[in-house]
Image (spheres, rainbow, N blue to C red):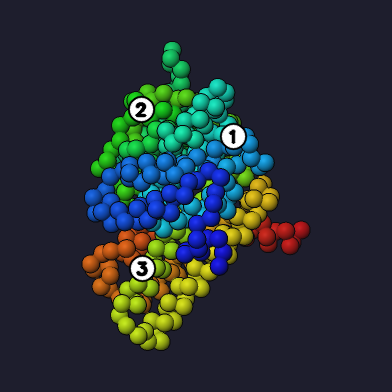
Amino acid sequence: MSIFSPGREERDSPGVTHDLKDTVASIATGADERDAHPSFPEVPFLQLAAAGALALPVPDPKGEQGRRASFAEEWRILRAVARADGSVGRILDGHFNGVERVSLLAPEPLRSAELEAIAAGELLLGVWGADPIPGEGEPARLVEDDHGAKLVGVKTFCSGSTGLDRALVLVRSSAQGPPLLAYVDLSENVDVDTRWFSGAGMRASESHRVVFAGTPVLAVLGEPGELLREPYFSRDAIRTAVTWAGISDSAVEAALDVLAAKGEPDDVVSLAAGRMLAARGTIDSWLAYAADRADEYPSSLSEISTELREAVSLSCRMILDEAARAVGSRPFAVSGPLDRARRDLELFLLQHRLEPALVRRGRQAISDRRS
């Protein structure tokens, strides 16, 4: 079993206390209630902060690699949290992405002050990139006044919107060109439209429509098009796949629990269970391979991130299909962990279109053989 396989004992981590296992168990216990009555998962994030999990991407100046934990450890923890509750995992995924970019790009003294607060568990970050469709408002843009840079306009699918302290927001400026990455303080001039997100899945992720009305910009990070810079964009993408994996773990375990309660399985049910386990093994192998590469060769992830996400996505869909085939309709009619995992994962997978990236990879592979 890889380090990503469910059931493996928790290992020590330089940035995480021994309370994390209990924290993950507590998050799992409250997941159904948060799904039934959605609100920002404040208690889980207070627990994660106390356990040191929010500080994992903050550089450790005493560490040889400058990291408080390896990528393997960070992704293991993210997967465990997503397994406990997909909505909490989604917000934690965005926080990790945001912290890495602030560490890389924020100017001093802002960088040091923000990282100190993040390490202390006092700031929670997100990354918001989705623009509104026609009728939902004007896309967010950067404007300048006598008091500095501010944001005006709208973003959608803003995960964690009712509970984050900071957001890295993909915005346009008056000039033409790639979008900018604005680091904003969410404590003022932000209106969250909590009626916008009413989907069946990821209910506690609070992924609402946000209206900026002169929101202060702490800094513009990097150059135009910064969000796509490698290898950081591929790390973002792999964290998303890790979160998918965690939710799929929940689906596998819930399906097996249902099947075990029914008694001795027949061949059809046993085959479906075997296929679920095979799909999970594929996910484990890909993520273990990526973690080894990330820790050994941090700049190499762009070479594998597209194929990894496609493999994990297909395996997740196989798990959902085989689970449904095996358990029948009852677990979805009465709801519960399997139904929640299915709703969460189906919605989350739809938010990431892999086809364009796969087309580019495939075309390049064919062109290389022709040249």
Give the secondary structure at mark 1: helix
Residue 192 makes an appearance in the image = yes
Of 357 and 25, nearer the camera is 25
Quadrant of the rendered image containing residue 369: bottom right
Give the secondary structure at mark 3: helix
Where in the figure is residue 34, as x and y percent of width and height?
Answer: 28, 51
Where in the figure is residue 160, as x and y percent of width and height?
Answer: 37, 41
Disc 2 to disc 3, how far (Cα)? 39 Å
Residue 200 makes an appearance in the image = no
Disc 3 to disc 1, how far (Cα)? 39 Å
Mark nearer the N terminus (2 vs 1):
1
Of 94 and 304, nearer the camera is 94
Q: Nearer the viewer, mark 2 or mark 3?
A: 3
* Residue at the image position 51 percent from the left and 30 percent from the top: 116
Q: Three-letter amino acid code at disc 2?
A: Ser
Of 249 and 30, nearer the camera is 30
Q: Which mark is residue 254?
A: 3
Q: Three-letter amino acid code at disc 1?
A: Leu
| Residue on which the image places disc 1 | 104
* Residue at the image position 46 percent from the left and 34 percent from the top: 120
Disc 2 to disc 1, how far (Cα)? 23 Å
Q: Which mark is residue 187?
A: 2
Quadrant of the rendered image containing residue 178: top right
Left or right: where does residue 146 sit relative to residue 290?
left
Is 105 placed above or below 72 here? above
Where in the figure is residue 192, as x and y percent of width and height?
Answer: 30, 35
* Residue at the image position 55 percent from the left and 67 percent from the top: 1
